[in-house]
Amino acid sequence: MSKHLSKEELQTDPLLQNVARATTFFNENRTLIISVFIGIVVVVGSLIGYSYYINNQEQQAQELLSTAERFYSEGDYERALEGNYDGKELTFGFLAIANEFSGTEAGNLANYYASVSSFKLGNIEDALIHFEQFEMPSGILGVGSISFYASMLKENNNLEKAAKTYIKAAEWNVNESTTPYNLLEAAKIYYGLGKLEEAKQLTERIKKEFTNSSEATEAIRLDGKISISSI
Protein backbone atom coordinates (compact mmCIF):
# COMPACT_ATOMS: atom_id res chain seq x y z
CA MET A 1 0.00 0.00 0.00
CA SER A 2 1.50 3.28 -1.11
CA LYS A 3 2.26 5.89 1.47
CA HIS A 4 0.81 9.38 0.98
CA LEU A 5 3.12 12.12 2.16
CA SER A 6 1.63 14.80 4.28
CA LYS A 7 1.82 18.48 3.35
CA GLU A 8 4.48 18.98 6.01
CA GLU A 9 6.57 16.08 4.67
CA LEU A 10 6.32 17.42 1.13
CA GLN A 11 7.46 20.81 2.29
CA THR A 12 10.55 19.31 3.94
CA ASP A 13 11.52 17.01 1.02
CA PRO A 14 15.08 18.12 -0.06
CA LEU A 15 14.47 17.45 -3.75
CA LEU A 16 11.20 19.31 -3.82
CA GLN A 17 12.73 22.15 -1.87
CA ASN A 18 15.50 22.49 -4.46
CA VAL A 19 12.98 22.37 -7.30
CA ALA A 20 10.94 25.05 -5.60
CA ARG A 21 14.01 27.23 -5.09
CA ALA A 22 15.04 26.77 -8.71
CA THR A 23 11.55 27.66 -9.94
CA THR A 24 11.48 30.77 -7.79
CA PHE A 25 14.96 31.79 -8.89
CA PHE A 26 14.04 31.33 -12.56
CA ASN A 27 10.86 33.36 -12.23
CA GLU A 28 12.72 36.16 -10.48
CA ASN A 29 15.64 36.15 -12.92
CA ARG A 30 13.93 35.05 -16.13
CA THR A 31 15.37 37.83 -18.32
CA LEU A 32 18.92 37.35 -17.08
CA ILE A 33 18.83 33.56 -17.51
CA ILE A 34 17.43 33.76 -21.04
CA SER A 35 20.07 36.34 -21.96
CA VAL A 36 22.87 34.13 -20.61
CA PHE A 37 21.49 31.13 -22.49
CA ILE A 38 21.32 33.08 -25.74
CA GLY A 39 24.88 34.26 -25.11
CA ILE A 40 26.10 30.69 -24.68
CA VAL A 41 24.37 29.65 -27.91
CA VAL A 42 26.01 32.56 -29.76
CA VAL A 43 29.47 31.70 -28.37
CA VAL A 44 29.15 28.01 -29.27
CA GLY A 45 27.89 28.92 -32.72
CA SER A 46 30.77 31.35 -33.19
CA LEU A 47 33.31 28.71 -32.16
CA ILE A 48 31.87 26.22 -34.65
CA GLY A 49 31.90 28.88 -37.36
CA TYR A 50 35.46 29.91 -36.51
CA SER A 51 36.63 26.28 -36.60
CA TYR A 52 35.10 25.88 -40.06
CA TYR A 53 36.72 29.13 -41.18
CA ILE A 54 40.18 28.08 -39.92
CA ASN A 55 39.93 24.68 -41.59
CA ASN A 56 38.96 26.33 -44.85
CA GLN A 57 41.82 28.84 -44.52
CA GLU A 58 44.28 26.03 -43.83
CA GLN A 59 43.25 24.12 -46.93
CA GLN A 60 43.49 27.21 -49.12
CA ALA A 61 46.89 28.15 -47.67
CA GLN A 62 48.24 24.64 -48.23
CA GLU A 63 47.21 24.76 -51.88
CA LEU A 64 48.91 28.12 -52.41
CA LEU A 65 51.98 26.93 -50.52
CA SER A 66 52.42 23.95 -52.82
CA THR A 67 52.81 26.27 -55.83
CA ALA A 68 55.37 28.45 -54.04
CA GLU A 69 57.21 25.31 -52.93
CA ARG A 70 57.52 24.27 -56.57
CA PHE A 71 59.35 27.50 -57.40
CA TYR A 72 61.51 26.97 -54.32
CA SER A 73 62.44 23.41 -55.31
CA GLU A 74 63.46 24.71 -58.74
CA GLY A 75 65.81 27.22 -57.12
CA ASP A 76 63.67 30.18 -58.23
CA TYR A 77 63.76 31.85 -54.83
CA GLU A 78 62.60 35.23 -56.10
CA ARG A 79 59.32 33.90 -57.47
CA ALA A 80 58.92 31.58 -54.48
CA LEU A 81 59.22 34.58 -52.19
CA GLU A 82 57.31 37.25 -54.11
CA GLY A 83 54.87 35.19 -56.16
CA ASN A 84 54.39 35.29 -59.90
CA TYR A 85 52.03 36.74 -62.51
CA ASP A 86 52.32 35.33 -66.01
CA GLY A 87 49.63 37.49 -67.59
CA LYS A 88 46.91 34.96 -66.88
CA GLU A 89 47.33 33.71 -63.36
CA LEU A 90 48.61 35.26 -60.13
CA THR A 91 50.36 32.90 -57.72
CA PHE A 92 51.05 33.73 -54.10
CA GLY A 93 54.61 33.75 -52.81
CA PHE A 94 55.72 32.90 -49.30
CA LEU A 95 55.45 36.50 -48.14
CA ALA A 96 51.81 36.83 -49.20
CA ILE A 97 50.88 33.43 -47.77
CA ALA A 98 52.49 34.23 -44.42
CA ASN A 99 50.66 37.57 -44.31
CA GLU A 100 47.23 36.47 -45.52
CA PHE A 101 47.10 33.17 -43.64
CA SER A 102 48.99 33.98 -40.46
CA GLY A 103 46.72 31.86 -38.28
CA THR A 104 47.39 28.63 -40.15
CA GLU A 105 50.17 26.04 -40.05
CA ALA A 106 50.84 26.70 -43.75
CA GLY A 107 51.14 30.42 -43.05
CA ASN A 108 53.63 29.71 -40.27
CA LEU A 109 55.66 27.43 -42.53
CA ALA A 110 55.63 30.15 -45.19
CA ASN A 111 57.54 32.37 -42.75
CA TYR A 112 60.31 29.79 -42.57
CA TYR A 113 60.39 29.34 -46.33
CA ALA A 114 60.53 33.12 -46.71
CA SER A 115 63.50 33.23 -44.35
CA VAL A 116 65.41 30.53 -46.23
CA SER A 117 64.57 32.07 -49.62
CA SER A 118 65.76 35.50 -48.50
CA PHE A 119 68.95 33.94 -47.18
CA LYS A 120 69.50 32.17 -50.50
CA LEU A 121 69.08 35.52 -52.25
CA GLY A 122 71.70 37.08 -49.97
CA ASN A 123 69.24 39.18 -47.97
CA ILE A 124 70.32 38.14 -44.50
CA GLU A 125 68.58 40.95 -42.62
CA ASP A 126 65.26 40.11 -44.27
CA ALA A 127 65.87 36.42 -43.60
CA LEU A 128 66.33 37.12 -39.89
CA ILE A 129 63.14 39.21 -39.76
CA HIS A 130 61.09 36.51 -41.47
CA PHE A 131 62.49 33.83 -39.18
CA GLU A 132 61.46 35.75 -36.09
CA GLN A 133 57.83 35.47 -37.29
CA PHE A 134 58.17 31.68 -37.45
CA GLU A 135 56.87 29.54 -34.59
CA MET A 136 59.27 26.62 -34.28
CA PRO A 137 57.81 23.14 -33.91
CA SER A 138 58.62 21.05 -30.88
CA GLY A 139 60.89 18.02 -30.90
CA ILE A 140 63.31 17.00 -33.63
CA LEU A 141 61.38 18.95 -36.29
CA GLY A 142 62.41 22.23 -34.68
CA VAL A 143 66.15 21.51 -34.47
CA GLY A 144 67.00 22.21 -38.10
CA SER A 145 65.25 25.57 -38.12
CA ILE A 146 67.00 26.73 -34.93
CA SER A 147 70.36 25.58 -36.27
CA PHE A 148 69.64 27.47 -39.51
CA TYR A 149 68.87 30.58 -37.49
CA ALA A 150 72.20 30.21 -35.70
CA SER A 151 73.95 29.95 -39.08
CA MET A 152 72.31 33.18 -40.22
CA LEU A 153 73.34 34.96 -37.04
CA LYS A 154 76.88 33.73 -37.58
CA GLU A 155 76.81 34.93 -41.18
CA ASN A 156 75.60 38.30 -39.94
CA ASN A 157 78.54 38.41 -37.50
CA ASN A 158 76.30 38.20 -34.43
CA LEU A 159 78.60 35.57 -33.00
CA GLU A 160 77.67 35.59 -29.32
CA LYS A 161 73.98 35.11 -30.10
CA ALA A 162 74.86 32.54 -32.78
CA ALA A 163 76.71 30.40 -30.24
CA LYS A 164 73.82 30.55 -27.78
CA THR A 165 71.39 29.65 -30.55
CA TYR A 166 73.48 26.62 -31.56
CA ILE A 167 73.30 25.50 -27.93
CA LYS A 168 69.53 26.05 -27.99
CA ALA A 169 69.36 23.83 -31.09
CA ALA A 170 71.44 21.19 -29.31
CA GLU A 171 69.11 21.21 -26.31
CA TRP A 172 65.86 21.45 -28.28
CA ASN A 173 65.92 17.70 -28.87
CA VAL A 174 68.87 15.82 -27.42
CA ASN A 175 69.97 13.01 -29.73
CA GLU A 176 73.13 11.38 -31.08
CA SER A 177 73.04 13.22 -34.40
CA THR A 178 72.10 16.89 -34.13
CA THR A 179 73.14 17.59 -30.52
CA PRO A 180 76.92 17.01 -30.86
CA TYR A 181 76.94 18.88 -34.19
CA ASN A 182 75.34 22.00 -32.71
CA LEU A 183 77.46 21.86 -29.56
CA LEU A 184 80.60 21.71 -31.68
CA GLU A 185 79.48 24.67 -33.81
CA ALA A 186 78.94 26.68 -30.62
CA ALA A 187 82.35 25.58 -29.29
CA LYS A 188 84.06 26.73 -32.50
CA ILE A 189 82.48 30.15 -32.21
CA TYR A 190 83.47 30.53 -28.57
CA TYR A 191 87.02 29.48 -29.44
CA GLY A 192 87.14 32.08 -32.20
CA LEU A 193 85.91 34.71 -29.75
CA GLY A 194 88.63 33.76 -27.30
CA LYS A 195 86.12 32.43 -24.79
CA LEU A 196 88.17 29.34 -24.09
CA GLU A 197 86.40 28.23 -20.92
CA GLU A 198 82.99 28.18 -22.66
CA ALA A 199 84.48 26.32 -25.62
CA LYS A 200 86.17 23.82 -23.28
CA GLN A 201 82.93 23.05 -21.45
CA LEU A 202 81.22 22.20 -24.73
CA THR A 203 84.04 20.02 -26.09
CA GLU A 204 84.17 18.13 -22.79
CA ARG A 205 80.46 17.48 -22.97
CA ILE A 206 80.76 16.18 -26.54
CA LYS A 207 83.59 13.83 -25.58
CA LYS A 208 81.73 12.57 -22.51
CA GLU A 209 78.16 12.25 -23.80
CA PHE A 210 78.68 11.57 -27.51
CA THR A 211 81.82 9.46 -27.55
CA ASN A 212 81.03 7.64 -30.76
CA SER A 213 80.09 10.69 -32.81
CA SER A 214 82.31 12.15 -35.51
CA GLU A 215 82.12 15.44 -33.59
CA ALA A 216 83.91 13.79 -30.67
CA THR A 217 87.05 13.46 -32.79
CA GLU A 218 86.80 17.12 -33.82
CA ALA A 219 86.22 18.08 -30.20
CA ILE A 220 89.50 16.38 -29.23
CA ARG A 221 91.34 18.38 -31.90
CA LEU A 222 89.69 21.60 -30.78
CA ASP A 223 90.69 20.77 -27.19
CA GLY A 224 94.30 20.68 -28.33
CA LYS A 225 93.97 24.17 -29.82
CA ILE A 226 92.29 25.42 -26.64
CA SER A 227 95.12 24.04 -24.52
CA ILE A 228 97.76 25.74 -26.68
CA SER A 229 95.84 29.04 -26.58
CA SER A 230 95.57 28.79 -22.80
CA ILE A 231 99.36 28.70 -22.33
Image (cartoon, rainbow, N blue to C red):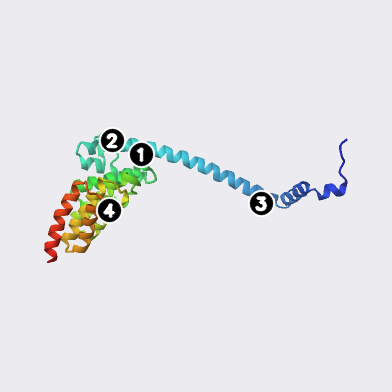
Mark 1 neighbour class, 10 Å CA radius: few under 14, some 14 to 19, many 20 or more: many
Real-space Cα distance between discs 3 and 4? Answer: 50 Å
Label 2 element class: helix
Q: Nearer the viewer, residue 188 or 60?
A: 188
Label 4 element class: helix
Task: Report the residue marked by disc 3.
Answer: 32
- Amino acid found under the numbered disc labelled 4: Ile
Real-space Cα distance between discs 4 and 1? Answer: 21 Å
Number of the label disc, if any, that sits on residue 61: 1
Q: Do the residues labelled 3 and 4 touch (CB within 8 Å)?
A: no
- Amino acid found under the numbered disc labelled 1: Ala
Real-space Cα distance between discs 3 and 1? Answer: 42 Å
Q: Quadrant of the C terminus?
A: bottom left
Q: Which of 176 and 75 is in front in this view?
A: 176
Task: Report the residue marked by disc 4.
Answer: 129
Q: Is residue 177 visible?
A: yes
| Chain-order first, disc 4 or disc 1 | 1
| Chain-order first, disc 3 or disc 4 | 3
Q: Nearer the viewer, residue 148 or 66?
A: 148
Q: Which of 177 and 46 is in front in this view?
A: 177
